[in-house]
Amino acid sequence: MIYLTRLNGQKIMINIDLLEFVEETPDTLITLTTGKKFLVKESSQQIRDEIIRFKRTANIKLKK
């Protein structure tokens, strides 16, 4: 999950496995596979970078 910011400043967490579309209209509109939509302050590039960061962190192998 990644943190994003709604236009009113409220922080929300989005499950990246549910992302269907990220559009800039000019505000960034997130559409989930459930049909739910969110307008957020972050750009599509920032969201992409956060998803990559999250996936890299989630895939780190822990040494014993």
Image: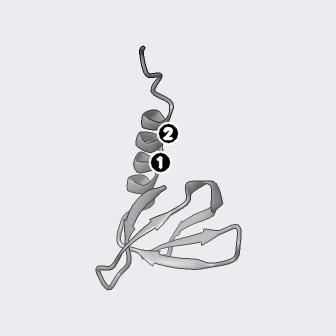
Residue 15: % across, % down: 55, 60
63 or 53, nearer to the observer: 63
The disc at residue 55 is 2
Residue 43: % across, % down: 39, 62
The answer to whether residue 28 of the structure is visible from this angle is yes
Q: Is residue 53 above or below residue 28?
A: above
Amino acid at dot 1: Ile
Q: In this view, does 64 lie above or below 8?
A: above
The disc at residue 64 is none
Q: Which element carries disc 2, helix, strand or loop?
A: helix
Residue 10: % across, % down: 33, 79
8 or 45, nearer to the observer: 8
Query: Would residue 13 be found to the left or right of residue 32 on screen?
Result: left
Query: Would residue 25 be found to the left or right of residue 32 on screen?
Result: left
How far separated are the C-alphas under marks 2 and 1?
A: 6 Å
Residue 64: % across, % down: 42, 14
Q: Do the residues labelled 2 and 1 touch (CB within 8 Å)?
A: yes
Res 17 → quadrant: bottom right
The answer to whether residue 26 of the structure is visible from this angle is no
Residue farthest to the top, as pictured: 64
Give the residue displayed 51% in from the left and 78% down from the top.
38
Residue farthest to the front, as pictured: 64
44 or 59, nearer to the observer: 59
Q: How many labels does the image show?
A: 2
Give the residue displayed 50% in from the left and 64% down from the top.
14
Amino acid at dot 2: Lys
The disc at residue 51 is 1
